Amino acid sequence: MGKTTFRRLLCLVGVCSMLLPMGAQSKLDSIQRLDEVVIKAKTYKQVIPAQVLKGEELKKLNSFSVADAIRYFSGLQIKDYGGVAGLKTVNIRSMGTNHMGVFYNGIQLGNAQNGQIDLGKFSLDNIEEISLYNGQKSEIFQSAKEFGSSGSIYLTTRRPKFEGNKNTNMLVKAKAGSYGFLNPALLYEYKLSEKISTCMSAEWIGSAGDYKFRYRRVDVEGNLKYDTTAVRHNSDIDAMRIDAGLYGVFEKGKWNAFAYHYTSERGIPGAIVNNVWKRSERLWDRNSFIQGGVEYDLLPKLSTRINMKYAFDYTHYNNNDPSIKLADDIYKQKEFYFSWSNKYSISPAWDVSLAYDFQWNDFDGYNVTDDHDKEHPSNQATRGTHWLSLATAFTVADRLKVQASLLGNFVNEEKRERDSAPNKSKLVPGIFFSYQPFKRQELIFRAFYKSAYRLPTFNDLYYTDMGNPALKPETTTQYNVGIAYDRTRNNKLFRDMHIGVDVYFNDVRNKIISFPQGPQFRWTTINLGKVDIRGIDASAAFNWAFPYGWQLTTKLQYTYQEAIDVTNPKTTDGTNQGDNYYRDQIPYIPWHSGSVILSLSWNSWTLNYSYIYVGERYNQQENIIYNHTQPWYTSDMTLMKEIKLRKINLRLTAEINNVFSQDYDVILNYPMPLRNYRFGITVEI
């Protein structure tokens, strides 16, 4: 154990020792409510319902990070480069990572440099709920920026709630497993008064990451070229997260303040190519932000909300491997964000909203060896973005629900010592419907149309040797129609049922895609021009209650997608030969994918089985046999036992991941771990 690791463990122990004397009790203040719950209380607002994982369902999954958990949502594709330390990003309905907004306690996480949010950095230890919305959230009382994403993931942390006369809660967790994995965590909640409470959370993550994998390759004729078992090197991680929040209520509103810090050092194992099995790339991250907001009812029908955030991100990338381009680069990002949202209720069934957001991004990048003036780095850019939204939502006869929005984007940009991208502006509309034809049956038809606008990142525009300040923004137009049926029966063997199917078409213009070229941290960006995306998302969930306390929950997700490049067709007169990959499936998008979750519980025991399947796909633009990537699947199991000892709740977990030891790559030449194990204990007081 290195000195850095020891200091971080000592820090956690110190935090525990300071908090323990304060007392220890458990659960959430009845006055404090999750924002998502408050929104859902007005059921007529749910035009397009979210896919949701929360509470006990999250605990039962074999999921360590947010990236692991959202694999069970339909319509998503995860790019996972392997192991705890591997980069993990998300793509919605084949439109790309940059079209997915990721919101942490209601405020979007940002990365103006490359637009990639690494969801592997966000642990589930303090996450109460994960929600996925296609199009946008079914609530108009939100920031202007929230109307701008093609899809949104909302991460809601646990908020303090206290039972009875308790004024403290404490939760201590520890996980250990294969490849030297160790993950202690602490969560502490304290009620300062009847109207103010606080929550503090900390965890450390350590793993050697030296997992075994099978490397097997055949040529296009099916002849075996390689078949060996090796060990993945340089996939270690040493990371720590600390966050704290204050939550308060007053007569006509509520407020919150939140601080977050994440620091890590990790190896970047790189791709297994040209018989190279080891890499020496290293990555250091420091991500910090403070944010807060206040919501106030100015009048019985008029509410206002103000949110603010300041974030600072530091990244240090080092590579001393001469087989790859040598690098020792530092990147710094600063972000300031302000949002002012207003909602007016014209009637109980009709609301309108107006919101204004401003965000300022500053990016500095320099090479440690070449750039001598660290105060004025050669690679520097700033961007100021304004959003203005107008939206309305109403219901007709308790059956027809409508939500419509119009968002204006206005961008000012400046690049030091290089041509800047031109200023830009764009209006993007959206309209959502749902209709319940039979009042006593939960059969609902739904549809939406939405346009979205995605700016090129700083890397797209200014990155050395491949940036292009004239790069066009990417726009998407989404069309969706669907149907959902819900049925609930009490005191029956069959309790609950949900079935939903959505058919969609996405038209993407000037599509920008990024993929690793050489070192994992360096990205190559190309513009595909125009992509047509057609797909089907289907989901089903069933709950059964059997005699003697047995309960069974099943959840199924399936996605079909055809995402083809239609940029440059061949002309009939022969004047244009077109692209070889015209009407080919774009890289890493499978035609078929799906998941199954089975959860069987009896008294204090729970057995959970989860299965994920991703079908065949191609790793390059041309759909030829040389670029074909095989389907993969994985099965995971969790056994959980809960024990109550007076005022202490104890939970023991045993996990088997990749039960059948399937060898697979999510991204070509980035092998995933074979069968591995984790064991955990949680103590809640």
Image (cartoon, rainbow, N blue to C red):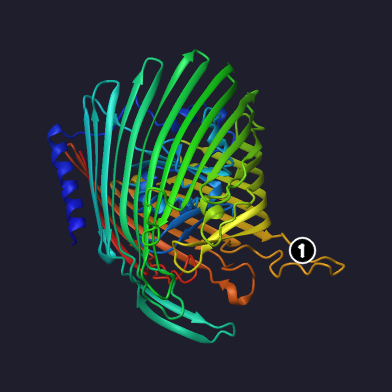
497, above or below 466, in the image: above
Q: In which quarter of the image is the C terminus?
A: top left
Q: Identify the residue at the far right of this view.
A: 573
Q: What residue do we see at 34% from left, 34% from top?
A: 258
Q: Where is residue 618, by image quadrant?
A: bottom right
Identity of the amino acid at label 1? Answer: Pro
Instruction: Please tell me how crowded label 1 is: few (under 14), some (14-19), or many (20+) other residues with Cα within 10 Å.
Output: some
Q: Mark 1 points at which residue?
A: 569
Front in this rendered view, residue 255 or 664: 255
**x, y percent for residue 343:** 54, 22
Q: Can residue 610 be seen in this view?
A: yes
Q: What residue do we see at 46% from left, 72% from top?
A: 669
**x, y percent for residue 283:** 35, 59
Q: In which quarter of the image is the N terminus?
A: bottom left
272, above or below 385, in the image: below
Front in this rendered view, residue 546 or 163: 163
**x, y percent for residue 507:** 68, 50
Front in this rendered view, residue 403 or 650: 403
Q: Identify the residue at the far top of this view.
A: 299
Q: What residue do we see at 40% from left, 57% from top?
A: 371
